[in-house]
Amino acid sequence: ASTFVKMGVKKIRLTGGEPLIKKDIVNILTQLSQLPIELTLTTNAVLVDKHIDTFKNVGMKSLNVSLDSLKAERMNAISRREYFARIIANIDLLIESEIDVKLNVVLMKGVNDDEILDFIEYTKFNKVDVRFIEFMPFSGNEWDRSKMVSLQEILDVANEQFPSIQKLEEKPNFTSRNYRVDGYVGTFGVISTVSNPFCDSCNRIRLTADGKVKNCLFSAEESDLLTQLRNGDDIRPVIRAA
């Protein structure tokens, strides 16, 4: 991580799986927080209450929460766990702690696409950024374009219900196109990886759990960093090439 930062990386996000189940996650967050970066992570929020003090101690300003439904029975069925009430309570805890929350919602037709308006309505009184994510093709997830809810379909549903939607300014290297309903404290956006990709502005680079550099979630190619590191070789040329 320190090598990446010396080469210009300014933000590090821990993803998963679920990073908060790692036994030494507190140590990892504490060490990473010593670097001059913005530190964040993506979580299912089940263990947020156990780590809220750590988040504050390491100066974490924002956090991504994966939540595919606002209906308890449906969310429990999707996750195959009975944690919905705890997740919602932990989202409230993050908001109370003044940690910005981005809710990642993967939309699928016939599964949760009937909740688009519910999620937007959730931003009325909750200071969260709901981000609808187009269902993406990965090996093993039985992807089918007919299951995907596109950027335009989401906006069509939103505009029909909310005539006063304002488009927010896009930040450099954005992944989400963001919007706000007039008077609502939160915002919503769409990560349109499939129907309207943002590859030309993407500046992300990924380090996998087994030490490979992966330029894109869709990339079939990886660059082995761990072997270089364990051999005591300079890893910077591998990073530069990637």
Image: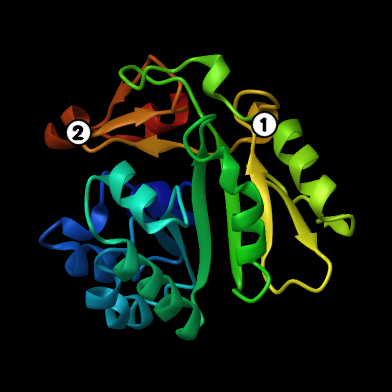
Q: Position of residue 210 (x, y in %)?
A: 19, 33
Is residue 22 rendered to the left or right of residue 73?
Answer: left
Secondary element at image label 1: loop
Q: Position of residue 175 (x, y in %)?
A: 63, 42
Task: Name the amino acid type tagged 1.
Answer: Phe
Considering every residue shown, the one lying at the far front of the view is: 73
Is residue 1 rendered to the left or right of residue 188?
Answer: left
Residue 223 is drawn in which quadrant?
A: top left
Q: Which mark is residue 210?
A: 2
The residue located at (40%, 80%) in the rendering is 93
- Decide which of tag 2 and tag 1 comes sooner along the chain: 1
The residue located at (38%, 65%) in the rendering is 35
Q: Position of residue 163 (x, y in %)?
A: 89, 55
Q: Position of residue 20 (x, y in %)?
A: 23, 60
The residue located at (67%, 55%) in the rendering is 188
Q: Which label lies toward us, 2 or 1?
A: 1
Q: Nearer the viewer, residue 233 or 187?
A: 187
Q: Which mark is residue 198?
A: 1
Category of crowding for the residue at label 1, using alpha-carbon neighbours closer than 10 angstroms: few (below 14), some (14–19), many (at least 20): some
Callouts 2 and 1 close, C-beta under 8 Å = no
Tell me, yes or no, if residue 8 can be seen here: no
Q: Nearer the viewer, residue 72 or 215?
A: 72
Tell me, yes or no, if residue 237 can be seen here: yes
The residue located at (39%, 21%) in the rendering is 138
Task: Relative to 57, say whether 146 is above or below.
Answer: above
Task: Name the amino acid type tagged 2.
Answer: Asp
Instruction: Tell me how far mark 2 sits from mark 1, CA to CA.
Output: 27 Å
Q: Which mark is residue 120?
A: none
Q: Nearer the viewer, residue 139 or 62?
A: 139
Category of crowding for the residue at label 2, using alpha-carbon neighbours closer than 10 angstroms: few (below 14), some (14–19), many (at least 20): few
Secondary element at image label 2: loop
